[in-house]
Image: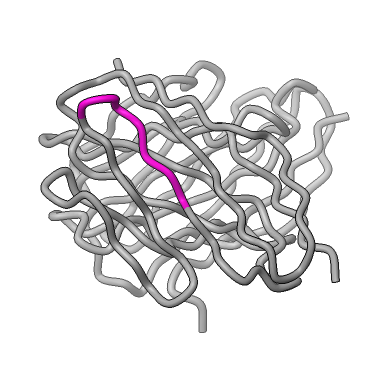
Amino acid sequence: DADVTQTPRNRITKTGKRIMLECSQTKGHDRMYWYRQDPGLGLRLIYYSFDVKDINKGEISDGYSVSRQAQAKFSLSLESAIPNQTALYFCATSDRDREHGYTFGSGTRLTVV
Amino acid sequence: GENVEQHPSTLSVQEGDSAVIKCTYSDSASNYFPWYKQELGKGPQLIIDIRSNVGEKKDQRIAVTLNKTAKHFSLHITETQPEDSAVYFCAASSGGSYIPTFGRGTSLIVHP
């Protein structure tokens, strides 16, 4: 099984719909992150969490919310999806001393029509 | 905040040639520089990293160099193979939160 699992892998949704992307990890890491990838723009941080009771905004948090349900679970929600939220979304984890960098999931490709 | 510039955006080489990807950063406090490889349909994977107290690090065919004075670091891949074809990301982060800032990525194409 993958260390970081994202569901769904692909999703097409309509403008205005609420959608949740889920992430679970078996690494035992405290820190979890959500990134968005767009062609030519690299990876941009949406939200991050350093432990279950900690939630922090990243550089592009508008239009998104997150929930850290447990150490191993971190979900990303789009309350009212819009077409410019069409992108590839990645969840990642890291340990406290970043000794081994990030472990990324395989991504969720979201299309908003 | 930190700003990371990565060049080139696309790099095309023949199998067996060397490939070099360069990044610059703006925050002199940055002290950790990882490189990630993203294959098609997959998430980025850490391939090598370097800390500010080291000038160069090698792992088989890949190496990373760091010039703290000039604030730039580079990824070197020797004897490239078709399976090296991927998007490569550099990143930089400083102490404290350790949240890295990523470059925009380089698409490396290795032609057989």
Q: Is residue A8 left or right of residue A98?
A: right
Q: Is residue B31 left or right of residue A103?
A: left
- Residue A46 % position (x, y): 46, 30
Q: Nearer the viewer, residue A54 or B31?
A: B31
A81 lies above or below A49: above
Q: Residue at x 48, y 51 (%)?
A: A91
Q: Nearer the viewer, residue A24 or B40?
A: B40
- Residue B42 % position (x, y): 65, 62
Q: Is residue B109 left or right of residue B106?
A: right
- Residue B45 % position (x, y): 49, 62
Q: Residue at x 33, y 49 (%)?
A: B65
- Residue B89 % position (x, y): 52, 45
- Kindly give the residue lying farthest to the right in the view shown: A113
Quarter-wise, where is residue B26 in the image? top left
A17 lies above or below B108: above
- Kindly give the residue lying farthest to the front in the view shown: B17
Colouring of the image: one colour
Q: Is residue B58 left or right of residue A42?
A: left
Q: Nearer the viewer, residue B96 or A85?
A: B96
Q: Residue at x 36, y 74 (%)?
A: A26
Quarter-wise, where is residue A41 in the image? top right
Question: Magenta stretch: residue A37 in it?
Answer: no
Q: Residue at x 56, y 19 (%)?
A: A63
- Kindly give the residue lying farthest to the bottom in the view shown: A1
Number of callouts: 0
| Quadrant showing the C terminus of chain A | top right
For the record, the magenta segment spans B69-75
